[in-house]
Amino acid sequence: MLTSLSLWGVYFASYMVDFILILIILIAKHMIYGNGNNFWKGADLLVWGILLLFVALSIFITNRIGKMKPNTRIKAIPEKNITHEMTGYVLAQVVTVATTIFTDWWILINVALFIVFGLFFVKSKAIQTSLHTA
């Protein structure tokens, strides 16, 4: 059985694809709209450093969870299509990347989405949340 902290770790790691996409979007925005001379200065460096740290932490969590051995057997077999249950999690990740492209308030919006959906994830004890871990 996964603890709440483990579920938060799985949820955090499920955003690895988003962290990479946000990093690529920010670098592309900087190359298109920004000044090329100050590429590694100021707040941009801090945000990029945090995103790289998040990617590394997500890789570590995914690797550790992949090496865990289950201590229980699951005997339930899905009898109906439950794909629609993933819609909320995938939608949250799509909105996360979209806000990075279309708004200047993307950090606040993404933190709020991450916390709200994370609370639902941990309370529901769901396991699969991302396209790369599904």
Image (cartoon, rainbow, N blue to C red):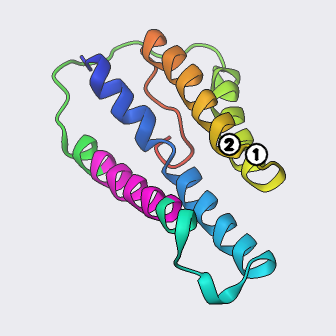
**Of the pair 62 and 73, the residue shown nearer to us:** 62
Of the 4 image quadrants, the one containing the N terminus is: top left
105 sits to left or right of 49 = right
* Image coords of residue 80 (percent x, y): 64, 15
Residue type for callout 1: Thr
51 up-or-down from 10: above or below? below
Look at the image and give the residue range highlighted in magenta: 47-62
Q: Name the magenta segment's main secondary structure.
A: helix
Magenta run includes residue 60: yes
| Kind of residue sitting beneath label 2 | Thr
Query: In the structure shown, which secondary structural element does the residue marked by tag 2 occupy?
Result: helix
At 41% from the left and 12% from the top, the residue drawn is 76
In the displayed orientation, state which residue is furthest to the right. Answer: 102
Structural crowding at the residue carrying mark 1, measured as other residues with C-alpha within 10 Å and reported as few (<14), some (14–19) or many (≥20): some
Quarter of the image for residue 55 reads bottom left
For residue 96, which numbered disc appears in the image? Answer: 2
Q: Pinpoint residue 123: horizontal percent, then vertical percent.
A: 45, 10
Q: Residue at x 46, y 44 (%)?
A: 133
Q: Residue at x 43, y 17 (%)?
A: 122
Q: Is residue 71 left or right of residue 6?
A: left
Badge 2 vs badge 1, beta-carbon distance below 8 Å:
yes
Label 2 – label 1 distance at C-alpha: 6 Å
Nearest the eye: 48 or 38:
38
Residue found 38% across the figure and 34% down from its top: 10
Q: Nearer the viewer, residue 72 or 11?
A: 11
**How far across and down, in percent of the image, does residue 56 sit?**
35, 58
* Residue 8 falls within the magenta-colored stretch: no
Helix, strand or loop for disc 1: helix
Q: Which residue is mark 1?
A: 99
